[in-house]
Image: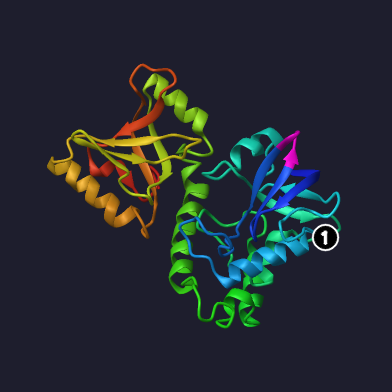
Amino acid sequence: MKGTVITNIKLIKVIDGDTIKILLNNEQESIRLSCLDTEESQYGGNKPVTNAGILASKWAKQYFGANEQGIPSGDVRVDLEFDTNDPVQVCLNKHRDNYGRLICYVYKAGDPENANVRIVREGWSPYFVKYGRSRLYHRQFVAAEIEAQAKALAIWNPATNAGGNRRDYTTLIPWWSLRDSVVQDYRYLGIQAGVLSVRLDYNHLLEAARVGNNVTVFCDLQAGIDQWTGNGAVVYAGSKFQRFNLWIPERDSASAQTILRLIETRYAKSGRGYVYVSGVASLYPAGNPDGKPQIVLTEAKQLADFPPGA
């Protein structure tokens, strides 16, 4: 299967090893290269800057023909390929991360291989499956990672980050693989069962909340409990672009304590993250047509590892 492609897009800036900016429909868009997570090259985030991150950023700028500030030398064009073959406008809404960046494969003019797989093969990023594997290039990514590891390239060579910060891939990769297996269950079982994804089916979730339908929603609780309000707890189960909350009332009750324990021990932080949440969808504030969808949790059985009927 080939994904939906948008060709001849002007490259505006290379930010680092896995992020660029392009001009699309006369507006700047940030692109996060799918299935990549290069190490950090700039301070200010919650991950440490590493030598491998700095070198990955330098490599990407050279690859795309940009200077040290990331500005292309001349008119550099790229093609974008999305991980599904939906219509372009659907892809532009569907393939975005929690920061609003488009997630796709990027092709530099004249290079038949996408930059995503190339960067993994060069050893600057592991095959990043924390949010699900590639539908189009899974085998190519696996082969590229194997090659980079066998050759001890970049992040797979201890000398690259010697004496400085480093990432513990021996811990991260098994966790990403666990999450990927959950996403695979959703893709092959959850969608068929009518489960709504916060990111992919947000408009359907909003409509269900407006009419008070009973739904099952696939969402990510890795952040855990976000806020204590009055006698209850709020879990932000969406993003700033797709707002969706879980509300746990009467937090001192036995049922609420069971739910809170389950979220913190099984789904939050380095747990599964992904969960199927079932219940009546409603709007908060109630009756406000511009409110955000929510589900009230009163029983632990509303949280499940598998979709209904699986």
How would you classify the magenta stretch by its main secondary structure? strand
What percent of the width, then of the height, locates residue 175?
A: 43, 64
The residue shown at (69%, 47%) is 21
What percent of the width, then of the height, locates residue 177?
A: 48, 63
Q: Is residue 294 placed above or below 220 in the rendered structure? A: above
On whether residue 184 falls in the magenta region, the answer is no
**Circle 1 sits in a helix, a strand or a loop, which is it?**
loop
What percent of the width, then of the height, locates residue 166?
A: 50, 73
The residue shown at (67%, 59%) is 137
Viewer-proximal residue among 188 and 3: 3
Viewer-proximal residue among 297 and 9: 9
Viewer-proximal residue among 114 and 143: 114
Residue 186 seen in render:
yes
Residue 140 seen in render:
no
The residue shown at (66%, 49%) is 104
Q: Quadrant of residue 301?
A: top left
Mark 1 is on which residue type?
Answer: Asp
Image check: 273 left or right of 156?
left
Q: Is residue 112 placed above or below 124 in the rendered structure? A: above
Q: Residues within 10 Å of mark 1 (few under 14, many from 20)?
A: few
Image color mode: rainbow
Image check: 293 left or right of 301?
right
Q: Number of numbered discs present? A: 1
On whether residue 24 falls in the magenta region, the answer is yes
Q: Is residue 307 placed above or below 174 in the rendered structure? A: above
Viewer-proximal residue among 67 and 208: 67
Q: Say which residue label 1 marks.
A: 111
The residue shown at (65%, 39%) is 91
Magenta span? 23-27
What percent of the width, then of the height, locates residue 275?
A: 38, 47
Image check: 262 left or right of 33?
left
Q: Is residue 286 placed above or below 46 in the rendered structure? A: above
